[in-house]
């Protein structure tokens, strides 16, 4: 009888240990999956941020080119006007 109880407890302990290992593996796997998801979100946010920054840089360059072009046109107009007035 006592031997059977010890055997049952040993068997029960092994099952508990196996169950604990399975639960621990599931927890570790869920943590790994969660970390991968978080990492993907961070990478995606960085990519989006880089695209936004790049678009801003491109927009600033376009605006700067337009300003420079307007200045050149204005200088040409002023120069033509000066030349016109000198010949009058």
Image (spheres, helix red, strand yellow):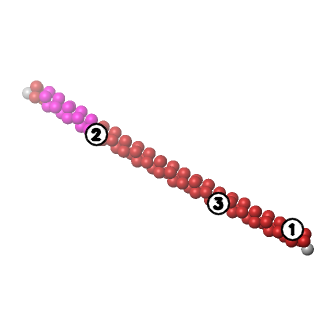
Disc 3 + disc 1, Cβ < 8 Å: no
Image quadrant in which the C terminus is located: bottom right
Distance CA(mark 3)–CA(mark 2): 58 Å
Q: Which residue is mark 2?
A: 23
Q: Which residue is mark 3?
A: 62
User: Which residue is rendered at x = 27% and y = 35% of the image?
Assistant: 21
Distance CA(mark 3)–CA(mark 1): 30 Å
Instruction: Mark 1: give few (<14), some (14-19) or many (20+) Cα within 10 Å.
Output: few
Image quadrant in which the N terminus is located: top left
In the picture, residue 65 is in which quadrant?
A: bottom right
Q: Which residues are magenta?
A: 6-23
Instruction: Mark 3: give few (<14), some (14-19) or many (20+) Cα within 10 Å.
Output: few
Provide the secondary structure element on which disc 1 rests.
helix
User: Which residue is rendered at x = 20% and y = 31% of the image?
Assistant: 13
| Nearer the camera: disc 3 or disc 1 | 1
In the picture, residue 61 is in which quadrant?
A: bottom right
Provide the secondary structure element on which disc 3 rests.
helix
Report the magenta stretch's main SS.
Answer: helix
User: Seen in the image, is 50 located left or right of residue 34?
Assistant: right
- Residue 2 spot, x, y in % from top left: 11, 26
User: Which residue is rendered at x = 14% and y = 31% of the image?
Assistant: 8
* In magenta segment, residue 17: yes
Disc 3 + disc 2, Cβ < 8 Å: no
User: Seen in the image, is 18 located left or right of residue 31?
Assistant: left
User: Is 26 above or below relative to 76?
Assistant: above
Q: Which residue is mark 1?
A: 82
Front position in the image: 32 or 7: 32
């Amino acid at each position: 009888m006592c031997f059977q109880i010890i055997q049952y407890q040993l068997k029960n302990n092994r099952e508990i240990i196996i169950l604990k290992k399975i639960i621990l593996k599931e927890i570790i796997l869920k943590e790994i999956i969660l970390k991968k998801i978080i990492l993907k979100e961070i990478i995606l946010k960085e990519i989006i941020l880089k695209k936004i920054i790049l678009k801003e840089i491109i927009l600033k360059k376009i605006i700067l080119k337009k300003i420079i072009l307007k200045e050149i046109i204005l200088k040409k107009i002023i120069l033509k006007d000066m030349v016109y007035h000198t010949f009058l």
